Amino acid sequence: MAEVCGHGEKIVQNLIDSQLEKEPLPPKDSVTVFQHFDKRHSEPCLIPQCAPVQNLSAVRQKLEAVFLENDANGDGFMSLEEFKLFLPSLNLKMSPQDMSTLFKEINRKNAHKLTFQEIFQYFDDMIQGRKAEHTQAELDLLAAFLKADKEGKCEVGGITQFINKRWEKFNNFKRDGKTGKLVMVGGVEAKDVLPGEYSLVDLEPQDTKLKFVKISGVRWTKSDDPKSKSGSLSFPKDFDRRVPIETGTSDKLNYYGCCLANESQVKVSLLHRHAIQDFTYNENYYSDYVKGRAGVEKHEFAHLDCPFQEDSGFFILGKFSEDKDNELHLTAFKIPTRHTLYVPPLTIHSNDYLKGTWRTMLSDATQINHVLLELARYDGETDKFSFDFTN
């Protein structure tokens, strides 16, 4: 037993030195280790809480690279035969009977093949200490994975070569028409989706990088009497007033802490009483009301906003940079028809550029911190202005 526990201590040290990110020191009263019991021994061996939630994505990529490398026929599953070849690749020596037993332990659906989801869930359960007992074979496999991680045998970058090889017919795909002219092209790199069970939200294609404008030297001045007048949001004189347009998908809205309620499983708590009402922004809304007093706002109640027509204008979202206090990021979103935008409390936003009918949830329980847009002039004065939009 002393030898087994000594091996466990080496695992602990390997984890500390591994490629996983260093975590800040925990509070004195926190628990830093889980106790796992070998079924063949009465004394516990210790495995640290080595992979907090924020690091599991990196661990997942590394394991996926190992999985793909050992998926000999490229079908996205790992058969028992492939599993038996996979274990020696980690320098792990087991009897055929132990290999079969471990395969069945991971394979919870009693099928003939393992999915990557099953392997990752098994690995995650061990790291997070969700099981009270583990066989020696399980502990040995975890140690082998960690040793491979330590030695760089399953680096994150390794996954790309396996995916590209598997989908090489799709990458840079081209199709010619009857006249010989190009009629269809594929992207540079296909995204690999392994067999398993998914929610449709998880399978939603990820968008490209969000477009937003960065403006440095912005100053938000709150009004001393928000009920009767607005504050000011001062922009530097070199700001060209242009804000990029984006389609409002949950993936992109997430940058500002927002999402489409129709596609989200997030639960929210409303701290104030709200009302849902339809508002119609007529054609003269901007010219007769907004122009000359355009602004943005934030408040302590949440918003729900749903456009009823295609030409619904732009919903402005913004936030100050986490690294620079005076750097403002802004995007003009086109919200899909009949999709509901959720805007959390204290989110910088503006509905000055909306058109048509929107169904909105709002509250009058808290004050609105509204500021007017002001652009600095070279003579030291400021001018009121409105945003322009660009694709």
Image (cartoon, helix red, strand yellow):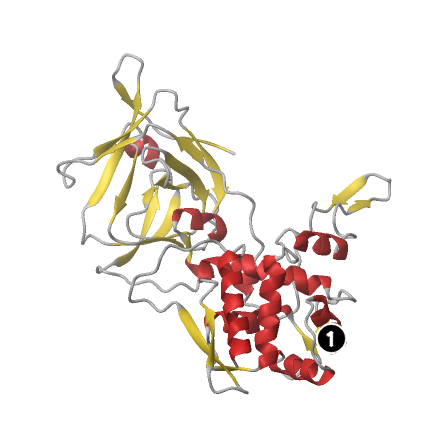
Would you say 366 lies left or right of 250 here? Answer: left
Element carrying mark 1: helix
Q: Position of residue 287 (x, y in %)?
A: 33, 30
Residue of label 1: 84
Total labels: the figure holds: 1
The one nearer the camera, 206 or 285, is: 206
Q: Position of residue 381 (x, y in %)?
A: 25, 17
Would you say 263 lies left or right of 203 here? Answer: left
Q: What residue do we see at 18% from left, 47% from top?
A: 367
Would you say 340 lies left or right of 289 here? Answer: right
Which of the 4 image quarters holds residue 137? Answer: bottom right
Farthest top residue in view: 379
The one nearer the camera, 345 or 55, is: 55
Q: What residue do we see at 44% from left, 49% from top?
A: 253
Number of residues whose C-alpha sits closer than 10 Å to that of mark 1, classed few (under 14), some (14–19) or many (20 or more): some
Query: Could you tell me if residue 117 is visible in this image?
Result: no
Query: Could you tell me if residue 227 is visible in this image?
Result: yes
The amino acid type of the residue labelled 1 equals: Lys
The one nearer the camera, 320 or 353, is: 320
Would you say 373 lies left or right of 159 here? Answer: left
Q: Position of residue 255 (x, y in %)?
A: 43, 47
Q: What residue do we see at 54% from left, 54% from top?
A: 19
**Above or below, 142 relative to 388:** below
